[in-house]
């Protein structure tokens, strides 16, 4: 499918789709064709809406705009989802397995029209109109609907459109500093919260109440300054020159525009232009998101992977000047949404073993290639988190308490953490043992320090790239790292795990289970698809001890421990990351703690493969799993001569120099 945008041709496609939408559906009609006619009506509706989206449209009352917004997402939320083709269960029930899976993938992809309409991106609307017409016209000529032939067409369309889509994606994510999202943030009257509806994203009470709260909040500039300073400090900490970079990506949430407007201003003061490629909102239906996690499995194979690689590399090369300006990302995480435990649907697509291997290989290769254009050695990041109103009636109090945590004194924590590092550097291995029902019992092997006067294993991490303070972390040796990691309840990437248990042998996950489902097979598949994917196993990339006892006490005070993001939770006890180390792609850059010692534990047996087999050196993931203080019997540094140095005992710091951390518990 060759594509060139032309407005006259775009209008022609709308006329064609309108004619399809006008076809009457009756019981005798082929059900797949009826599905396409239904989707034609949706496309027609959104294309018509695009023409109405001007100042007059947004002058409507707040209530009218909210009603319009909710109507756009009727098919994917609430009761509407039960009889929507976006629901794989319904689509398969109506059309059978093969055609149903095709239909649910298409129906889901067409929801992207909403953002294109609100951004007036006629180019992409034209492209997807052509895409739809190619499918409909192909099906219209079939006497009998052949699912295999439709899949072949979809594959051809994917191959032929790869270059266009990769170019569009790269520019949106990492190049363009001006777009409709940034325009909303900079130029809207933020006191009039009707501006929220200009995104076209689903707007819930979270976005509305956040905007109302921040419109009267006094510390907006303080938050923006904290984040920008942390971002720049991340460069300075690693001896990188941020002045060589002039763009940075911002990932934030609808409703936070007051903070983001101040952030744009603060970044400009440091000669950095913000890129707003994505503004997150509350999902209208997390089950819908989960159901379509692996839609690519419909036609994904080696040929598509190779074409995508080729297209991405071309996009990199064509945009290398823009990529050279890119300095990294500033992330505003949100937390406090109602916990979500997904239903695993047999009708939803899954990648098979061969597809998983192809995807894993693609991701490994693309990471290597991307680093050539955006070297990790020249970029940094920062990340901070704030609650959403859904967290509870005391949202405003929680917000204030989280800000206190985010503003803790880095210098104070740096000194305390150094005493912990001094003890841990004596260890041959660190023994972590759970308390009560917690089954954790793991021995983490340390790298050998040759010159204790100049070398250390642990980084003294305060509030720069990761806000808030604080932790000490290392990249363990994989060999001889053995044992069980267990947490009774944890949320990872917004998914709930009950009694997550990982058994490690020589640093790799050997066995795994949880109790989310009645059947053990379902529990294993859940972990494999969401925690290990696309790998069959992962190494321990990080061992750390969080020192932010105040965060833990505040979380317990508000009963929000299980609602906090890993960004904060990882500072509230020992944690283990499965996947890559914290030094991926920058292992050869020397890093020093404030005491002048070089952190030598930047590699492990997996990452060192970068010198001989770079495609297998990295996993492309890093997932932190934390054990709360109260679930810890002990964390003990065990020396080669058998000496044992307790860091934590019965959930409290017992090491001299670190006992001050216990004051938060009083």
Image (cartoon, grey):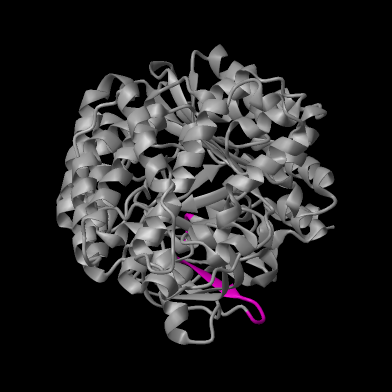
**Going by the image, does 550 lie left or right of 119?**
right
Which residue is drawn at the image coordinates 47% and 47% (left, top)?
A: 41
User: Can residue 399 be spotted in the picture?
Assistant: yes
Image coordinates for residue 662, horizontal then vertical, percent: 76, 56
Image coordinates for residue 661, horizontal then vertical, percent: 72, 52
The residues colored magenta run 425-437
Which residue is drawn at the image coordinates 63% and 36% (left, top)?
A: 254
Image coordinates for residue 185, horizontal then vertical, percent: 62, 24
> Which residue occupies the extreme bottom position in the image?
519
Which residue is drawn at the image coordinates 57% and 30% (left, top)?
A: 230
The answer to whether residue 159 is above or below residue 315 is: below
The quadrant holding residue 492 is: bottom right
**Going by the image, does 505 lie left or right of 180?**
left
**Going by the image, does 492 lie left or right of 161?**
right
Return the residue nearer the eye: 586 or 309.
309
| Magenta run includes residue 293 | no
Image coordinates for residue 392, horizontal then vertical, percent: 80, 54
Query: Where does the C terminus fall, quadrant-wise?
Result: bottom right
| Magenta run includes residue 434 | yes
Return the residue nearer the eye: 510 or 621.
621
Query: Where does the N terminus fall, quadrant-wise?
Result: top left
């Amino acid at each position: 499918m060759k594509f060139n945008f032309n407005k006259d041709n775009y209008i022609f496609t709308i006329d064609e789709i309108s004619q399809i939408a006008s076809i009457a559906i009756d019981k005798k009609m082929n059900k797949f064709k009826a599905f396409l006619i239904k989707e034609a009506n949706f496309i027609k509706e959104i294309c018509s809406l695009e023409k109405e989206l001007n100042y007059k449209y947004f002058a409507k009352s707040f209530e009218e705009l909210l009603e319009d917004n909710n109507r756009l997402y009727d098919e994917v939320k609430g009761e509407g989802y039960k009889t929507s083709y976006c629901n794989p269960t319904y689509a398969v029930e109506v059309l059978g397995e093969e055609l149903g899976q095709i239909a649910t993938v298409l129906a889901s992809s067409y929801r992207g029209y909403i953002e294109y309409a609100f951004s007036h991106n006629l180019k992409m609307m034209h492209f997807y109109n052509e895409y739809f017409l190619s499918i409909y016209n192909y099906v219209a000529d079939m006497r009998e609907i052949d699912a295999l032939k439709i899949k072949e067409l979809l594959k051809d369309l994917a191959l032929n459109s790869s270059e266009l889509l990769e170019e569009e994606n790269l520019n949106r994510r990492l190049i363009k500093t001006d777009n409709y999202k940034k325009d909303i943030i900079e130029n809207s009257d933020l006191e009039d919260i009707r501006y929220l509806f200009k995104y076209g994203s689903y707007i819930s009470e979270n976005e509305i109440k956040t905007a109302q709260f921040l419109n009267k909040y006094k510390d907006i500039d303080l938050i923006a300054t904290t984040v920008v300073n942390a971002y720049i400090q991340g460069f300075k900490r690693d001896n990188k020159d941020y002045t060589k970079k002039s763009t940075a990506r911002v990932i934030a949430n609808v409703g936070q525009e007051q903070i983001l407007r101040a952030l744009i201003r603060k970044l400009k003061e440091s000669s950095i232009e913000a890129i707003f490629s994505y503004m997150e909102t509350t999902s209208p239906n997390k089950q819908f998101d989960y159901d379509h996690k692996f839609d690519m499995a419909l036609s994904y194979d080696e040929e598509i992977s190779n074409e995508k690689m080729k297209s991405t590399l071309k996009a990199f090369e064509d945009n290398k000047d823009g990529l050279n300006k890119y300095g990294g990302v500033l992330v505003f995480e949100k937390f406090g949404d109602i916990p979500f435990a997904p239903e695993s649907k047999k009708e939803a697509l899954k990648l098979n073993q061969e597809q998983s291997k192809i995807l894993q290989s693609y991701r490994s290769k693309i990471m290597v290639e991307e680093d050539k254009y955006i070297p990790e050695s020249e970029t940094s990041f920062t990340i901070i988190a704030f609650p959403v109103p859904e967290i509870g009636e005391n949202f405003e109090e929680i917000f204030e308490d989280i800000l206190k945590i985010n503003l803790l004194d880095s210098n104070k924590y740096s000194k305390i953490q150094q005493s912990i590092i001094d003890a841990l550097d004596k260890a041959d291995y660190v023994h972590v043992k759970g308390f009560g029902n917690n089954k954790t019992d793991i021995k983490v092997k340390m790298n050998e320090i040759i010159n204790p006067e100049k070398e250390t294993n642990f980084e003294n991490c305060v509030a720069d790239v990761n806000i808030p303070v604080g932790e000490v972390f290392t990249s363990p040796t994989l060999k001889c790292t053995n044992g069980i990691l267990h947490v009774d309840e944890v949320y990872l990437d917004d998914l709930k795990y009950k009694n997550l248990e990982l058994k490690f042998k020589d640093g790799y996950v050997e066995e795994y289970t949880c109790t989310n489902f009645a059947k053990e097979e379902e529990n294993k598949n859940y972990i494999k698809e969401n925690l290990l994917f696309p790998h069959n196993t992962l190494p321990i990339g990080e061992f750390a001890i969080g020192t932010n006892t105040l965060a833990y006490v505040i979380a317990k005070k508000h009963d929000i421990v299980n609602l906090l993001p890993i960004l904060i939770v990882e500072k509230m006890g020992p944690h283990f990351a499965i996947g890559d180390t914290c030094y991926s792609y920058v292992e050869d850059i020397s890093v020093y703690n404030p005491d002048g010692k070089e952190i030598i534990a930047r590699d492990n047996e997996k990452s060192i493969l970068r010198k001989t087999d770079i495609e297998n050196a990295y996993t492309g993931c890093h997932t932190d799993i934390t054990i709360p203080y109260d679930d810890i019997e002990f964390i003990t540094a065990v020396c080669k001569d058998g000496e044992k140095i307790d860091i934590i005992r019965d959930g409290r710091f017992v090491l001299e120099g670190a006992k001050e951390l216990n004051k938060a518990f009083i």
